Structure formats: structure tokens, C-alpha cells
Image (cartoon, rainbow, N blue to C red):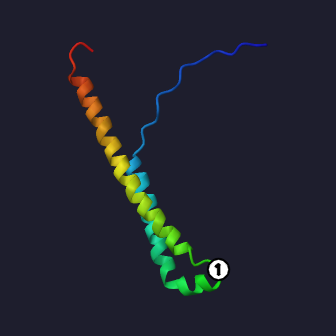
Amino acid sequence: MPKTALHPSPPPLEANDVAIVGGGTVLWFVGFLVLLPFQHTLSAHGHGSWPWICLSGGLLGLIGLWYCRARRAAIQRDRVSGEALPGQ
């Protein structure tokens, strides 16, 4: 059996999570607003839950925004406290 060389894992990529989640949240709310005027027609064809699915996605996106901002703040606090410790 041939041996393969083990390489160290690359560092995680940094992304602007708040912008990504914010963009998705806006799209969910736009979908809700676009579908809301067609609620009666959608219900008549058995798709009446679509606007409410979009609204749920938008509301969950708000929770995601809160989480991403709290995570970003925690990472910043950790970096600052790590820099403030002498001898490291």
C-alpha cells in the first residue's frame, strides 16, 4: 500500500459572514414581499405556504445576523486579549 504524505491543514478562510447572511436575509424578505400579493392565487393552486416560508427564512436570517455579529465580536475580543498577554 503506497504511503501518502500528510500535509498540515490550511488555516480557515475568513469571510464576511455578516454580509453573506445579511444578503440572504434581504432576499428572503424580498421573496415574501413579492409573493404576498399573490397569496390568494398561490393558495388556490396549493402553494399558499410559500410566502410564509420566505417570511420564516427572513426571521431566521435575523437570528443568524445576531449570531454572526456576536461571533465576530467574540473573535475580536479573543484577538485583543491574546495580543495583550505578555510573553506570548
For the C terminus, give its image quadrant. top left
On the image, the x and y values in percent for residue 84 come to: 20, 23
The crowding category of the residue bearing disc 1, from other C-alpha atoms within 10 Å (few below 14, some 14 to 19, many at least 20), is few
For the N terminus, give its image quadrant. top right
Q: Is residue 31 left or right of residue 16?
A: right
On the image, the x and y values in percent for residue 71 come to: 35, 42
Rendered view: 61 above or below 1: below
On the image, the x and y values in percent for residue 60 come to: 44, 59
Residue at x-position 32% and y-position 36%: 75
The amino acid at mark 1 is Gly
Which residue is disc 1 drawn over? 46
Residue at x-position 48% and y-position 63%: 57
Rendered view: 69 above or below 13: below
Residue at x-position 28% and y-position 30%: 79
On the image, the x and y values in percent for residue 4 come to: 69, 16
Which picture quadrant has residue 22? bottom left
Q: Is residue 46 left or right of residue 57?
A: right
**Residue found at the far right of this picture:** 1
Rendered view: 32 above or below 38: above
Q: Nearer the viewer, residue 42 or 9?
A: 42
> Tag 1's secondary structure?
loop
